Image (tube, coloured by chain):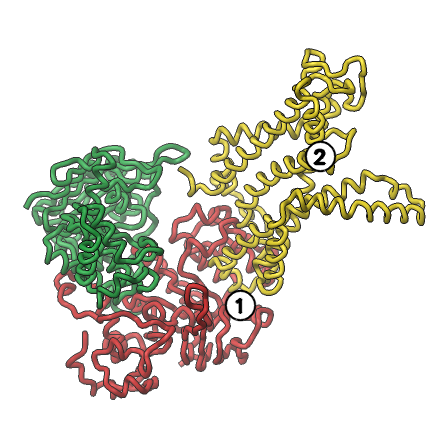
C-alpha cells in the first residue's frame, strides 16, 4: 500500500491533524510542563550511569543517614549510599517497568479489542466477560495472589529444569521476579485498553468511510488497519499517557509491599518503603523518592489532560 | 434500446430490530418489499421518495453492501445478491457508490492521494509507477488540481470533498455508480456544480447511474427514468418527461406539489399532502399509501396494487388509475 | 410600521489558535413588527450566528465584537446574560434546526413545553400543562392531550419539529426565529411546517425570521428576503423583487442554479464556480468578486456598501458596484 506523499511539487500546505494537535498541545502550559518533566526523566533514565555522582550500590558506612548537603544533594541512606544516585537509578527501573508493562498491555488490548469490536460475536462476548472479571477484582490483590501462588511452583520448575539441563539461566532468580511482576502487571493493565479499543472500533466501524472502503472491495484486514485503528488512535494516546503514570505508581506500590523489584536494585517504591520506617529521624529518606514519584505522576496527568484537549479540540473551552 | 446492465428481481430487505426499553420485543422493519427493475446501460435511473421509502436500501442491496433478504441482482450473468464478501470483490470494481455526506465518507487520517490510490493498487489496475499520472487524471476529471493529492479531507470544502468521493468511485473505472443522495448535503450553488459534473462524467465514460434523491426537482435534470418509491414499494416508474408532464400515482402528484416553487405568488396557494409516512415496522395493509391517499377506496385497504404499464414507458401501482387518460382527479391534492 | 429589530454593523469573530477570524462582517438588517424576513445564504455565511448572537447563544470562542442590535428599544448586545435569558422564550422564540437533538430525550414533551411557561411567566404546573395542550393543538398535533405524556422518541421528525415550534411559541413571542427548521425533514413534511408557521404568524401577528439555505422554500413564506454571502448582506428586498429582478450577481446565480420543475430535463444547470471564502481569508474587496463573472477592477479594491437600487422598489438594497445601477431595469 502507499504511504506518504505521492505528488509533491507545488504543494504549499502539507497539513495534518497531528500537526494541529501538536500546536494546540504547545499552547497548554501545564501539558508542556508535564512534557518537559517527562523528557528530563527519560534523559536521566537513559544516561543514568553517566549522571550519577556515586555508584548506587557502593556503601560508605562512615557517611550513613547524612542529611542533604553539597556532596550528597539528597543525603545518604542507612548504608551510606547516595540517595540522589539511587533515585536516578530508580527512574530507570520505573521507566523500564512503565514502558514494558504498557507496551505489552497495549499490544494485547489493541489486538483483542480490535478483533472483538470489528467482528463481534462469541469472541466479543467472551472477551468482555474476561475484562469484566479482571477489572472487578482489586488490582493489588490480584497481583499478590498471582505472585504468592505462582512463585513457588515456578521456582521449583526452574530448579528441576536446571538439574536436567545444567543451563545456568535457570538459576537466575531475578528472571522469576521480572516475569512474575511484569507479567502480572501487564495482566491487570490490558483490559482497560481492550475495552477502549473495542468501544472505539464499534463506533468507527459503522462510519460512512468504512462502508465506503467496503464498497471498494477492500479486505477486512486493510479496513481494520488503515481505516479503523488510525482513527481510534487519539483516545488511545491519552489512555497510554495516563497508563504510563499508573504503571509507575503500581510498580512503586508493589515494591513498597515487597512483591516488586527486590533490593538492592533501587526502585522508588522500595526506597519509600525503607524511608517510611525511619522517617521521624531521617525524613529526607522518605521525602526524596516520594517527591520525585509525586512530581512524575502529576506530570503524566498534565500531559494526559493536555493530549486529551489537543486531540479532541471540540471539547475545548 | 441498449442492453440491460443490471436486472433486479423481487428484491426484499428486512431488518430485525429490538423494541422496548430492554429490547424485549422483536420486530421486523420491511425496508424493501419486492423491488424489480432492469437498469439499462448508459441510462440514469432515479429513485425518489421520503425517508423510509427504501430508496437508499435499494442502492445498498443492489451493490450487496447490505445483503438482501431475498431476490436477485443479475450482473454479467451472475446473481451478485447471493455472493459473500470474497465473491463480491471482483465485481466491486465495476459497481461503485457515492455517499451522501462528503464530510464522513473520507478517512480523516488519509491524504486525498492515498485515498484515491488505494482502490487502484488494491485491485491491481495500474502499476505503482503510473499511479501519479492516474491520480492527476482522476483529479482533473472531477475538476481538482493535482495539488489536492497531499491534502487531508478536513482541509477541503464540502463540494471539494464530494468531488474527491466521486473521483474515488471513478478510480476503478466502473460501469455503474449508485449516487446515494450524493448532492443532498451540499449548498445550493455547489449542488448544481456536482450535478453537472456527474452529467459530464457520464458522457465521457458512458456511465450508468442509479441516482437516489428526495428532491424531484433535482432529479429532473439528470434522469432518463424516475422511480417514485413509498414505504418499500415502487409507486410509479416512468420516463422522466412523462412523469413530470403527466404524473399518474397520487403520491407522485403529492411529491410534485411539495416541491417549493420559486414563484412567490404561486407558492402561497397550494394544497398539501396531510399526515406523515407510517412506520415501516407496521406498514398499512393493501396499498401502503392508502392512509394518506385522497383517492383511497375499500379495495386499496385490502389488496396491494401491482405495478403495471398504463402508457408507453409509464408504470403505476394504483387501483384508482385505470389508464393514463381515464383517471378522475377531481378530489386529488394537486 | 416600525422596526421591531434593528441590527447595525454587527461583527462576529471566531477565536482561533491563530487569532480571531471574522465570520460576520458588518451586517445591517431590520425586521418590522409583523413582518417575516427570510435570511438566505450558504453554510458558513454567518446567517445562524447572526441570530444566535441576538439572544446570547453564540457557541464558545465565538463572540459578537461590534455593532448593535436594538430590539423593542434596547440593545441586545449590551444586555447582561440574565436579562437575555428572560427575553428568550418570552419576547423572542427560537426554533432550532434539528428536532431530534434539540429536545431532551428523557423528558415528556408536555413537561418540556410547560417548563418554559413555569419559569418564564410563573404559571402553576396544572395551568402550564393545560396551556401546553393548547399549544400542541395549535401546532396541529392530533389528540394533543395524549401527546403531552409522550417522550420525544415516540414522535416522528415532523411531530417533534411541531413540538419545537410549540415551545418557541410558549411565551407568545413578538419575534420568532426559525433556524433552518425543515432541513432535517422530508419534503412533504417541510411543506406542512412552512404552511404552519405562516398560519401562526398571520394569526398572532408576530414577526418571523426564517433562516435557510433554500431560496425556493421561503418564497411562499417571507415578505422580504436578505441574501447573505460571507458574513455580509449582499441584497435585501421584498420577496417579489428578489425573484423577479434579482440584482446582485450572487442572488442571480443562486436563483439560476435552483433546479425547478419547469426546466427541461437532462439540461445542465447554470452554476456558480468556486467556493465561498473561509472565515479569516476573505478577499480585500467585494467578498464575491473571486467567483463573480461580472467583476471589474473596482470590485477587488473596495467593499461595496449596501445601498438603495435606483428605480426599483424603495426597500430594495444591494451591495454591488456593477449591477446596482441596473436594478430598476430587467
**Circles 1 and 2 on the same chain:** no
Q: Give the residue pinned by disc 2.
A: A255
How many discs appear?
A: 2
Residue at image point 32% right, 74% down: B228
Using the numbered discs, state the Cα–Cα distance from disc 1 to disc 2 in whole angstroms: 58 Å
Residue B20 is left or right of residue A252, and the answer is: left
Residue at image point 23% right, 37% down: C82
| Nearer the observer, B294 or B249 | B294
From the viewer's perspective, is residue B299 above or below residue A38? below
Residue A164 is left or right of residue A111, and the answer is: right
Residue B209 is left or right of residue C73, and the answer is: right
From the viewer's perspective, is residue A74 above or below residue A137? above
| Nearer the observer, B181 or B147 | B181
| Nearer the observer, A62 or C1 | A62
Q: Which mark is residue B92?
A: 1
Chain C tint in image: green
- Using the rendered view, name the quadrant where residue B122 is placed: bottom right
Q: Which chain is yellow?
A: A
Could you tell me which secondary element the residue under label 1 belongs to?
A: helix
- Using the rendered view, name the quadrant where residue C29 is placed: top left
Residue C297 rendering spot, x and y as whole percentages: 25, 39
Residue C324 rendering spot, x and y as whole percentages: 15, 45
Mark 2 crowd level (few <14, some 14–19, many ≥20, 10 Å Cα) = many
Q: Which chain is red?
A: B
Residue at image point 41% right, 66% down: B20
Asked if one can make out residue A227 in the rendered structure from this viewpoint, the answer is no
Could you tell me which secondary element the residue under label 2 belongs to?
A: helix
Amino acid at each position: 500500500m502507499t504511504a506518504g506523499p505521492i505528488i509533491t511539487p507545488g504543494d504549499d500546505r502539507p497539513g495534518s491533524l497531528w500537526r494541529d494537535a501538536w500546536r494546540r498541545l504547545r499552547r497548554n502550559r501545564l501539558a508542556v510542563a508535564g512534557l518537559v518533566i517527562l523528557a528530563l526523566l527519560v534523559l536521566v533514565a537513559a544516561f543514568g550511569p553517566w549522571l550519577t555522582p556515586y555508584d548506587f550500590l557502593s556503601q560508605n558506612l562512615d557517611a550513613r543517614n547524612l542529611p542533604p548537603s553539597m556532596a550528597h544533594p539528597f543525603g545518604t541512606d542507612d548504608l551510606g549510599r547516595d540517595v540522589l544516585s539511587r533515585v536516578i537509578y530508580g527512574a530507570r527501573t520505573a521507566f523500564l517497568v512503565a514502558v514494558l508493562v504498557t507496551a505489552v498491555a497495549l499490544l494485547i488490548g489493541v489486538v483483542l479489542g480490535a478483533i472483538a469490536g470489528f467482528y463481534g460475536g462469541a469472541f466479543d462476548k467472551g472477551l468482555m466477560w474476561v475484562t469484566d472479571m479482571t477489572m472487578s477484582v482489586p488490582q493489588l490483590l490480584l497481583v499478590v495472589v498471582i505472585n504468592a501462588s505462582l512463585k513457588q511452583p515456578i521456582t521449583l520448575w526452574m530448579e528441576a529444569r536446571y538439574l536436567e539441563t545444567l543451563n545456568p539461566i535457570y538459576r537466575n532468580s531475578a528472571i522469576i521476579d521480572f516475569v512474575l511482576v511484569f507479567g502480572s502487571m501487564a495482566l491487570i493493565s490490558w483490559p482497560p485498553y481492550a475495552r477502549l479499543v473495542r468501544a472505539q472500533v464499534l463506533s468507527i466501524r459503522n462510519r460512512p468511510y468504512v462502508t465506503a472502503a467496503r464498497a471498494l472491495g477492500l479486505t477486512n484486514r486493510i479496513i481494520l488497519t488503515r481505516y479503523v485503528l488510525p482513527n481510534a488512535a487519539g483516545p488511545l494516546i491519552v489512555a497510554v499517557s495516563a497508563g504510563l503514570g499508573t504503571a509507575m505508581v503500581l510498580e512503586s506500590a508493589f515494591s513498597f509491599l515487597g512483591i516488586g523489584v527486590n533490593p538492592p536494585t533501587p526502585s522508588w517504591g522500595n526506597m519509600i518503603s525503607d524511608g517510611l520506617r525511619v522517617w521521624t529521624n531521617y525524613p529526607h529518606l522518605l521525602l526524596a523518592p516520594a517527591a520525585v514519584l509525586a512530581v512524575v505522576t502529576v506530570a503524566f496527568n498534565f500531559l494526559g489532560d493536555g493530549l486529551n484537549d489537543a486531540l479532541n479540540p471540540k471539547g475545548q473551552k | 434500446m441498449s442492453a440491460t446492465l443490471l436486472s433486479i428481481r423481487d428484491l426484499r430487505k428486512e431488518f430485525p430490530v429490538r423494541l422496548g426499553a430492554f429490547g424485549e420485543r422483536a420486530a421486523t422493519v420491511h425496508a424493501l418489499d419486492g423491488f424489480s427493475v432492469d437498469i439499462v446501460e448508459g441510462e440514469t435511473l432515479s429513485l425518489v421518495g421520503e425517508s423510509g421509502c427504501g430508496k437508499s436500501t435499494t442502492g445498498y442491496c443492489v451493490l450487496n453492501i447490505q445483503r438482501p433478504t431475498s431476490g436477485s441482482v443479475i450482473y454479467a450473468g451472475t446473481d451478485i445478491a447471493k455472493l459473500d464478501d470474497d465473491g463480491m470483490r471482483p465485481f466491486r470494481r465495476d459497481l461503485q457508490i457515492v455517499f451522501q455526506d462528503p464530510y464522513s465518507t473520507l478517512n480523516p487520517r488519509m491524504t486525498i492521494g492515498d485515498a484515491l490510490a488505494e482502490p487502484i493498487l488494491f485491485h491491481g489496475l495500474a502499476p505503482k509507477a503510473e499511479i501519479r499520472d492516474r491520480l492527476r487524471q482522476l483529479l482533473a476529471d472531477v475538476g481538482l488540481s493535482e495539488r489536492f493529492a497531499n491534502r487531508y479531507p478536513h482541509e477541503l470544502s464540502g463540494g471539494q470533498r464530494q468531488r474527491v468521493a466521486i473521483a474515488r468511485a471513478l478510480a476503478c473505472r466502473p460501469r455503474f455508480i449508485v449516487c446515494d443522495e450524493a448532492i443532498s448535503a451540499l449548498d445550493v450553488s455547489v449542488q448544481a456544480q456536482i450535478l453537472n459534473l456527474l452529467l459530464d462524467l457520464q458522457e465521457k465514460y458512458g456511465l450508468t447511474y442509479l441516482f437516489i434523491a428526495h428532491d424531484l426537482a433535482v432529479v429532473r435534470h439528470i434522469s432518463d427514468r424516475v422511480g417514485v418509491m413509498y414505504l418499500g414499494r415502487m409507486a410509479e416508474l416512468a420516463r422522466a418527461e412523462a412523469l413530470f408532464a403527466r404524473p399518474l400515482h397520487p403520491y407522485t402528484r403529492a411529491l410534485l406539489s411539495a416541491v417549493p416553487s420559486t414563484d412567490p405568488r404561486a407558492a402561497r396557494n397550494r394544497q398539501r399532502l396531510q399526515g406523515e409516512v407510517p412506520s415501516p415496522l407496521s406498514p398499512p395493509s393493501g396499498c401502503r399509501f392508502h392512509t394518506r391517499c385522497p383517492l383511497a377506496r375499500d379495495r386499496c385497504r385490502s389488496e396491494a396494487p401491482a405495478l403495471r404499464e398504463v402508457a408507453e414507458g409509464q408504470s403505476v401501482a394504483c387501483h384508482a388509475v385505470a389508464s393514463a387518460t381515464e383517471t378522475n382527479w377531481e378530489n386529488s391534492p394537486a | 410600521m416600525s422596526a421591531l429589530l434593528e441590527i447595525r454593523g454587527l461583527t462576529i469573530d471566531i477565536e482561533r489558535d491563530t487569532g480571531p477570524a471574522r465570520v460576520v462582517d458588518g451586517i445591517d438588517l431590520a425586521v418590522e413588527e409583523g413582518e417575516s424576513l427570510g435570511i438566505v445564504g450558504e453554510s458558513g455565511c454567518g446567517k445562524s450566528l447572526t441570530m444566535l448572537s441576538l439572544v446570547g447563544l453564540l457557541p464558545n470562542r465565538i463572540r459578537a465584537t461590534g455593532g448593535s442590535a436594538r430590539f423593542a428599544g434596547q440593545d441586545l448586545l449590551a444586555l447582561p446574560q440574565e436579562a437575555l435569558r428572560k427575553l428568550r422564550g418570552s419576547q423572542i422564540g427560537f426554533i432550532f434546526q434539528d428536532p431530534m437533538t434539540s429536545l431532551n430525550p428523557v423528558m415528556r414533551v408536555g413537561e418540556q413545553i410547560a417548563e418554559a411557561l413555569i419559569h418564564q411567566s410563573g404559571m402553576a404546573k396544572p395551568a402550564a400543562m393545560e396551556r401546553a395542550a393548547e399549544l400542541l393543538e395549535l401546532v396541529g398535533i392530533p389528540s394533543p392531550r395524549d401527546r403531552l405524556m409522550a417522550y420525544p422518541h415516540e414522535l416522528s421528525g415532523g411531530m417533534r419539529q411541531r413540538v419545537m415550534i410549540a415551545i418557541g411559541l410558549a411565551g407568545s413571542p413578538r419575534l420568532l426565529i426559525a433556524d433552518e427548521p425543515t432541513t432535517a425533514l422530508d419534503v412533504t413534511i417541510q411543506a406542512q411546517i412552512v404552511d404552519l408557521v405562516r398560519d401562526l404568524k398571520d394569526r398572532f401577528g408576530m414577526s418571523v425570521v426564517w433562516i435557510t439555505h433554500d431560496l425556493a422554500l421561503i418564497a411562499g413564506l417571507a415578505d422580504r428576503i436578505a441574501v447573505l454571502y460571507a458574513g455580509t448582506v449582499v441584497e435585501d428586498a421584498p420577496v417579489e423583487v428578489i425573484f423577479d429582478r434579482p440584482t446582485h450577481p450572487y442572488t442571480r446565480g443562486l436563483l439560476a442554479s435552483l433546479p425547478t420543475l419547469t426546466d427541461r430535463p437532462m439540461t445542465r444547470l447554470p452554476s456558480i464556480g468556486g467556493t465561498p471564502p473561509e472565515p479569516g481569508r476573505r478577499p480585500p474587496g467585494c467578498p464575491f468578486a473571486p467567483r463573480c463573472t461580472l467583476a471589474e477592477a473596482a470590485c477587488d479594491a473596495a467593499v461595496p456598501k449596501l445601498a438603495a437600487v435606483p428605480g426599483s422598489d424603495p426597500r430594495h438594497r444591494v451591495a454591488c458596484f456593477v449591477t446596482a445601477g441596473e436594478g430598476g431595469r430587467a
